[in-house]
Image: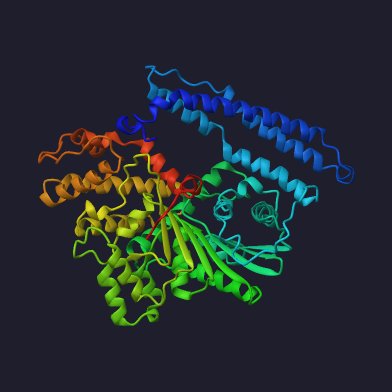
Amino acid sequence: MTFNKEDSKKLLPQNKRLYFSYSYLNKEKDRLTNLLLNQVIDLRVPAFIKNEKIHPQMIDKALKLKNINQAPSKQRFKRTSRNRKINKLKQLITKINNENLNLCHGYLNQIYLILLIHNLLPLHLRDKTYQPEELLKDSVFRTKLLQFDYDRYLYQEFKPENYLRLLAYNRIHRMPTHITSYDARDIFPEARECGFSATAYVISIDDVNECYITFRGTEAGSDDKIKSKSKRFEQSILETYKDWDYNINSILIGSDKNFSQLTVAREFVQYIKNLVDPNTHMYGLGHSLGGHFVQTLQLIDDCFDAGYTLNSAPVNLKLIQQVKPELLDKMTWDKLFALTDDTNNQKLLTPQIRKDINRLLPHDYSEILNESFEQDITQMFYELPYTIWIGKKWEYNLSNWTYPFKKHPRAYLSSDEIHSYQHFFEQLIAFLSESNSSTQVARNTMSFIRLRTRLLHETINNPKTAQFFYDYSNFLYSSGIFTDKPQQISKEFIEQNNSVLRGSLREWPFLRSVNRDMLSLATYFHVIDGAKHFLNRTPTKL
């Protein structure tokens, strides 16, 4: 999957079978898409006479499905220079990606939503009444609810409540009697300003009242109300920058430079708690950065009856102490910092250390379930100083594959090197703090990199600098990000070259060997759409 020769050996002999399976499924998709379109066109019900817009809406969605289905067959692929199995495998993966399955699911759901809204969807309700946390314990409901925050663009013409009603019915075969949604950015203007994003869904089923507050992660989103593509792109860049400002200052460093997102998160949760019925069950759900908010808010305010996170960023104890110092006494804080500090060069945080940490917290927080892909990129942040998780943690992996990414930087980097890594990103965010547009963010980022590369150029003869650079590079090589093994750098740097970056590439050719396929795969397994493939396995419980 990372297109590494050794990793691909077991998969390549299956090429013919993979191609056969893809061809069969593609033909079935063609047949079902045509059948759906014909049935939608031929559908005749009395409701269409009362509302002439319903039928054209459904036909429009079915036609869009058909257009998406036909698009891959019209695409021409470049013929590879060599007829190798690995090239055919790459082409097959490209074809599968071009099927645009998420968009297909979106338009299919839109057809269901039209039928549901107009009471045309046949309902098969079960007799057993709904029980508290039934939806929360449903893995598919959790992931689809979290994914909905990223898929809003597919449902612009529908109210969020309608999507939740359909999702709940599909999972439990009971119909909610009431659903109301609250967007943090509609209630608190400062949420948009600082980049915070969350939605609360208050749901009533069989007299059981539940509230699901979903916290969005760090992914480039865009405001669907903005019509200009260029302005939407600029807005998404700024949104990503604001999230990383919080990620680095509050999670990576634990500094007091940026509390804005956490402050709004606390205010939003309290606003919702004051709004709903006192008997309402409060649940927090979050992916990535959103998972950090679920854990952090529970540790600070104990505000959820239960919670769920997926590929969550960690809690930083330094941040918690600054926000709520009275949570623990000084002796307990000191013990926690001693256990989570890295000055003793502890290579891995052992199960015993984890137990010692949990015993010092106010309670066990077993109501919070944290699920993650075992080698997810965010898991490496749990190895940084003063970071923990609270509650239960279940990690998932596959038994019959090789995935090289290393989630334990302490095994490769010294304490000083980890602190240097943190300081680098702290300086980057400080350098970007005056950026007011996406163009400025991009320009200032490149300027910062050039300045730091020049500084490396000037200090490269220092043995400590050379060792730091090699250790960082070796960690990335061992994780599959580089395909060429880095060498200990020579004492003589290419002084005569005017371009620092070009000189670096000549001096260290392994820098050219960035494995883009590995980077794409690491990103894919972090997002919900990729992580969900692991969740039906047996987890390792930590």
State the residue in front, 462 or 382: 382
Q: Colour scheme of this structure image?
A: rainbow
> Where is the N terminus found, in terms of image quarters?
top left
Q: Give the vertical position of 137 relative to 221 (above or below).
A: below
State the residue in front, 63 or 33: 33
Expressed as whole percent of the image width and height from the top left, the position of residue 318 reads 34, 70
Q: Quadrant of residue 432?
A: bottom left
The residue located at (63%, 43%) in the rendering is 106
The residue located at (67%, 44%) in the rendering is 109
Expressed as whole percent of the image width and height from the top left, the position of residue 259 reads 43, 68
Expressed as whole percent of the image width and height from the top left, the position of residue 208 reads 67, 69
Expressed as whole percent of the image width and height from the top left, the position of residue 312 reads 43, 57
Relative to 213, 461 lies left or right: left
Q: Quadrant of residue 311?
A: bottom left
Relative to 378, 507 lies left or right: left
The answer to whether one can see residue 459 in this image is no
Q: Give the vertical position of 218 relative to 325 (above or below).
A: above
The residue located at (37%, 69%) in the rendering is 319
The answer to whether one can see residue 415 in this image is yes
> Where is the C terminus found, in terms of image quarters?
bottom left
Residue at the far front in the pictured view: 127
